[in-house]
């Protein structure tokens, strides 16, 4: 816990504990909470500029759909091999201690669930399931992966990849790849993630708002709050007059609303914060 042993950081953690102690906490997380699991964030230092696939491209352009499925398959395999880190585990410990009302995440990696957090709202979807856009049939990502590798044996061979936070990878080649279609109707398949330019489903938005509405404080972890879905939750908490604690390396769009802002790594800081909050119950 090198970060939390710095005097200025220890002071910031103490201030965060004072703001959160004795309150039920809603949690909002972003890509920064998963970087210690080997999954990059979108806007961190040295992060390359990415051009996300849009749903329109996936549906309307066969070549782009082929490219996406190759990259998405390679990314899914890397995601499947990632493990929850100390930050995920600390948040799960707060959950099991009865301190949090629930957790809203902008991540699609599923690591909060694997760490043991129970009430998790995945705002931007997940990489575990795939849905047919024509008939609505749903499939497990594992089953689709088996089909992809059966049709394209070269994709079963590990290769060096540059993983994106959304599970997408820019592959070396994809021109001759066979993409999966719906085994029920032959329709176009889409992973159950919110693509760039899509709206977060209303049900997910309302579930996330409910977590904030039930809380006495909001803890934001590893998000620059550059996406409106996160900013709206911070504004919702601010309008209710809730204490807002933000842990993130670098500035965020919510900093002016924060009661406490901690510019530090998420894993070490969450460990220290969780230990203190549980100890003072």
Image: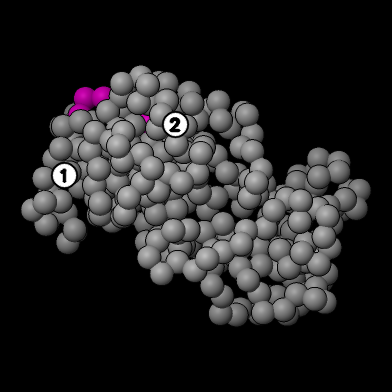
Return the x and y of residue 228 as percentages of the image width and height: 51, 39
Give residue 16's quadrant in the image. top left
Q: Are marks 1 and 2 in contact (CB under 8 Å)?
A: no
In the picture, the quarter occupied by the C terminus is: top left
Return the x and y of residue 226 as percentages of the image width and height: 46, 46
The residue that disc 1 covers is 12
Determine the main secondary structure of the stretch shown in magenta: loop
Circle 2: element type: helix
Give residue 21's quadrant in the image. top left
- The residue at 63%/71% (across/down) is 170
Give residue 175's quadrant in the image. bottom right
Q: Is residue 90 left or right of residue 146?
A: left
How many numbered dots are placed on residues in this image?
A: 2
The residue that disc 2 covers is 233
Q: Could you tell me if residue 167 is visible in this image?
A: yes
Q: Compared with residue 108, is residue 162 higher up or lower down, i.e. above or below?
A: below
CA–CA distance between discs 1 and 2? Answer: 23 Å
Q: Is residue 132 magenta?
A: no
Crowd class of label 2 (few under 14; some 14 to 19; many from 20; radius 10 Å):
many
- The residue at 11%/57% (across/down) is 6
Q: Is residue 273 left or right of residue 225?
A: left
Decide which of 274, 243 is in the foreground and name it: 243
Magenta region, residue range: 21-26
Crowd class of label 1 (few under 14; some 14 to 19; many from 20; radius 10 Å):
some
Circle 1: element type: helix
In the picture, the quarter occupied by the N terminus is: bottom left
């Amino acid at each position: 816990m090198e970060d939390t042993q710095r005097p200025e950081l220890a002071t910031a953690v103490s201030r965060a504990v004072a703001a959160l102690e004795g309150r039920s906490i809603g949690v909002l997380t972003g890509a920064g909470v998963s970087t210690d699991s080997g999954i990059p964030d979108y806007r961190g230092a040295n992060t390359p500029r990415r051009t996300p696939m849009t749903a329109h491209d996936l549906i309307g352009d066969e070549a782009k759909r082929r490219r996406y499925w190759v990259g998405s398959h390679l990314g899914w395999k890397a995601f499947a091999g990632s493990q929850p880190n100390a930050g995920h585990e600390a948040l799960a410990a707060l959950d099991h201690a009865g301190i949090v009302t629930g957790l809203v995440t902008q991540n699609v990696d599923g690591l909060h669930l694997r760490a043991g957090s129970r009430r998790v709202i995945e705002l931007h979807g997940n990489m575990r399931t795939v849905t047919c856009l024509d008939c609505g049939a749903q499939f497990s990502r594992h089953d689709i992966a088996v089909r992809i590798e059966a049709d394209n044996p070269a994709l079963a061979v590990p290769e060096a990849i540059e993983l994106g936070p959304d599970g997408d990878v820019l592959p070396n080649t994809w021109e001759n790849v066979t993409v999966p279609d719906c085994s029920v109707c032959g329709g176009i398949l889409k992973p159950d993630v919110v693509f760039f330019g899509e709206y977060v489903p209303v049900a997910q938005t309302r579930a996330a708002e409910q977590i904030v509405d039930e809380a006495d404080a909001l803890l934001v972890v590893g998000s620059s709050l550059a996406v409106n879905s996160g900013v709206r939750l911070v504004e919702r908490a601010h309008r209710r007059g809730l204490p807002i604690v933000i842990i993130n390396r670098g500035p965020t769009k919510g900093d002016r609303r924060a009661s406490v802002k901690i510019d530090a790594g998420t894993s070490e800081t969450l460990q220290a914060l969780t230990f203190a909050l549980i100890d003072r119950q």
